[in-house]
Amino acid sequence: MAKSWYPVIDYMTCIECGTCVSKCPHEVYDDLKAPSPVVKFPEECVDHCHGCGNRCPVGAITYVGDDTGWLPPGGGAREPDPCCSGTGAAECEKTVTVEYLYLDLHTCERCIGTDQVLDEVMTVLAPALRLAGFGVDYRKIGMETAGLAAEYRFLSSPTIRVNGRDICPDVRENPCRCCGEISGTDVNCRIFEYNGETYETPPKEMLARAILYAVFEKPENGCSCDTDYALPENLRAFYEGKDGRPSRACEDGCC
């Protein structure tokens, strides 16, 4: 099993045929979300396995950590996303990119709960945004390593960003028992404040309002790329304490 290798879905290209979900023998995908390909257990993906990517008819699957030069059949290497400032600003305004960044979708109750709520909200909002003339790019990215967390300038789990901006710019946290069990350390994870109440799993109304506000009101809080970044000590302790798993060979002819 791999720590820094797992599939990433381009949801704008994906046709939701369900092939990747049904053919993966390692149970990387969430069967309950089929035919939509939701990567639920990225840690189960086998290092350098291109099985689902080779089967995807539209080339919607790439891989974190891929250094092989492999290209998706029927697709191609995806161009880097334009930043939300400078020459790429006009393109950013045409596409609503919603990113869900999390530490764990296997054990952590607040990551799992927020994932489910966000799925429900995006099921409603995505068609409405497309009707309004926006492209919608909905991504889920597991922060499996400290290096990946640094690449995404990750501050707290879970995080939801719209066009690079955290919908909750003020990070508030409390102790997370689940992530503490994963790492064997004391870990704080994000809490959400809405209408005077505090939640470990945000209400649907809160997420819907925050996403629409980010799209149409264009809040002034900066893009994640605009500020200096250092991995928070809280997250550093999590990654250092997390138990490693030995990798295994690709089996069952999945590739």
Image (tube, rainbow, N blue to C red):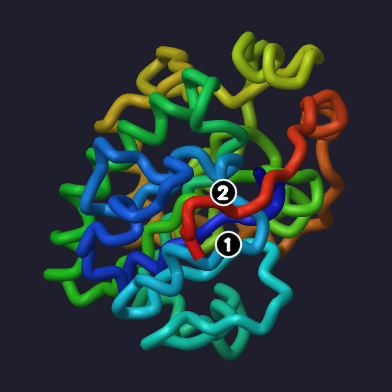
Residue drawn at (56%, 73%) of the image: 84
Residue drawn at (26%, 53%) of the image: 36
Residue neighbourhood size for the residue with mark 2, other residues' Cα within 10 Å, grouped as few (<14), some (14–19), many (≥20): many
Residue 98 location (% of width, % of height)? 42, 56
The dot on residue 49 is 1
The dot on residue 182 is none
Residue neighbourhood size for the residue with mark 1, other residues' Cα within 10 Å, grouped as few (<14), some (14–19), many (≥20): many
Residue drawn at (34%, 59%) of the image: 20
156 to the left or right of 202: right
Q: In front: 160, or 103?
A: 103
**Is residue 18 something one can see in this rendering?**
yes
User: Which residue corresponds to mark 2?
Assistant: 45
Give the SS element for disc 1.
loop
Give the SS element for disc 2.
loop
72 to the left or right of 155: left
Residue 71 location (% of width, % of height)? 54, 84
Q: Residue furthest front?
A: 252
In this view, 148 is above or below 111: below
For the residue marked with disc 1, what is the amino acid?
Cys
Q: In front: 5, or 235?
A: 5
Q: How far is the residue under mark 2 from the one under mark 1?
A: 7 Å
Which quadrant of the figure has residue 117? top left
Q: In front: 25, or 224?
A: 25
Q: Tell me the quadrant of the picture where the N terminus can be found.
A: top right
For the residue marked with disc 2, what is the amino acid?
Cys
Contact check, label 2 and label 1, Cβ < 8 Å: yes
